[in-house]
């Protein structure tokens, strides 16, 4: 283990702190020009983020800062990264969000400001004080809260049933939607009766005078074309009786259900829904779950 760490210590470029009291060489953290600890930086798939390992001067692993990806729940949002600080001796973990200066320097300042290093060990009392005082965990919770607020505003996430969203979806009696052994919604049928006057809208691509492309829209009435006609539309309803509005989400069309490159929610749900007469509605339900509409 020590030989492995020694090899790692010589492979990283120099990084110097602008702060006078802290400086970082290729592998050593200095406080007031005195060596305080070694550090090792290993590349993470989330480049340019790195896992950082703090090693005592007598070559014992003290602390790890491991990159974690927060996967955006919907396409409109962007995934981000945060760090899990893991105390090696007890595996105690502190999750934190960081923006700004290079993270190795941020971590070095944390070690200094909170006096975490003492006699080549992590001071347990200082560690507890750090967890209480450092704002990184509150910053992470606030960041996640903005994503939750977005889902509430666009998906009525606060009205949805709390459950494991990765579990298969089943439709009972072609009506009751279940997931994780909980009722999460209903399939309801809306009936429309024709008013007697129909309209046909056509869209024609044309060239304008300046040779740019435009679309010409024309609408014609078809009197009595659907007089008395009855149409039925299947809709999805939350358990709060709210009809799901999918206009804010990006829904994959049903013909993609046989073109998925890897197993998705629909694929694991289909074998449990052989009694459902309409597999297309199962695809739609699964899409709603995956996009946090249901």
Image (cartoon, rainbow, N blue to C red):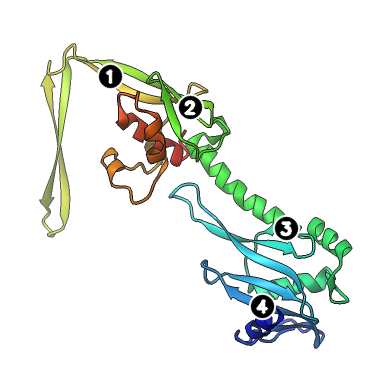
Image position, residue 7 (x, y; %): 64, 85
Q: Is residue 13 above or below residue 132?
A: below
User: Which one is earlier in the sequence, the residue at label 4 or at label 3?
Assistant: 4
User: Which one is earlier in the sequence, the residue at label 3 or at label 1?
Assistant: 3
Q: In this view, does 68 lie above or below 164?
A: below
Looking at the image, residue 118 sits to the left or right of residue 185; the answer is: right
The residue lying at 53 percent from left, 32 percent from top is: 180
On residue 40, the disc is 4
Does the CB distance between marks 3 and 2 fall below 8 Å?
Answer: no
Q: Is residue 249 above or below residue 44?
A: above
Q: Is mark 4 on a helix, strand or loop?
A: strand
The residue lying at 68 percent from left, 80 percent from top is: 5
Q: Nearer the viewer, residue 169 or 67?
A: 169
Looking at the image, residue 114 sits to the left or right of residue 225; the answer is: right
Residue bearing the label numbered 2? 178
User: Which one is earlier in the sequence, the residue at label 2 or at label 1?
Assistant: 2
Q: What element carries label 3?
A: strand
The residue lying at 43 percent from left, 28 percent from top is: 170
**What's the CA distance linking mark 1 and mark 4?**
64 Å
Q: Residues within 10 Å of mark 2 (few under 14, many from 20)?
A: some
Q: Nearer the viewer, mark 1 or mark 4?
A: 4
On residue 232, the disc is 1
Image position, residue 81 (x, y; %): 57, 60
């Amino acid at each position: 283990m020590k030989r492995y760490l020694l090899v790692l210590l010589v492979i990283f470029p120099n990084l110097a702190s602008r702060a006078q009291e802290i400086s970082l060489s290729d592998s050593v953290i200095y406080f007031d020009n005195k060596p305080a600890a070694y550090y090792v930086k290993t590349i993470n798939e989330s480049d340019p983020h790195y896992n950082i390992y703090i090693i005592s001067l007598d070559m014992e692993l003290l602390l790890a800062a491991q990159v974690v990806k927060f996967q955006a729940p919907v396409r409109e949002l962007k995934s981000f990264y945060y760090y899990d600080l893991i105390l090696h001796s007890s595996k105690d973990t502190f999750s934190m969000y960081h923006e700004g200066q290079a993270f190795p320097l941020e971590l070095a300042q944390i070690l200094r400001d909170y006096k975490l290093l003492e006699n080549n060990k992590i001071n347990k009392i200082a560690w507890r004080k750090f967890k209480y005082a450092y704002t990184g965990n509150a910053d992470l919770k606030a960041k996640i809260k903005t994503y939750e607020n977005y889902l509430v505003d666009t998906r009525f996430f606060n009205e949805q049933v709390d459950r494991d969203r990765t579990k298969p979806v089943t439709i009972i009696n072609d009506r009751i939607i279940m997931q994780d052994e909980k009722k999460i919604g209903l399939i309801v049928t809306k009936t429309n009766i024709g008013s007697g006057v129909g309209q046909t809208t056509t869209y024609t691509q044309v060239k304008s005078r300046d040779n740019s492309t435009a679309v010409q829209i024309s609408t014609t009435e078809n009197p009595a074309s659907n007089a008395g006609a009855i149409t039925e539309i299947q809709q999805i309803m939350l358990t709060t009786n709210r009809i799901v509005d999918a206009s804010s989400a990006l829904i994959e069309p049903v013909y993609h259900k046989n073109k998925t490159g890897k197993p998705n929610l629909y694929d694991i749900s289909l074998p449990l829904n052989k009694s459902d007469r309409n597999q297309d509605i199962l695809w739609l339900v699964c899409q709603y779950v995956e996009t946090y509409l249901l």
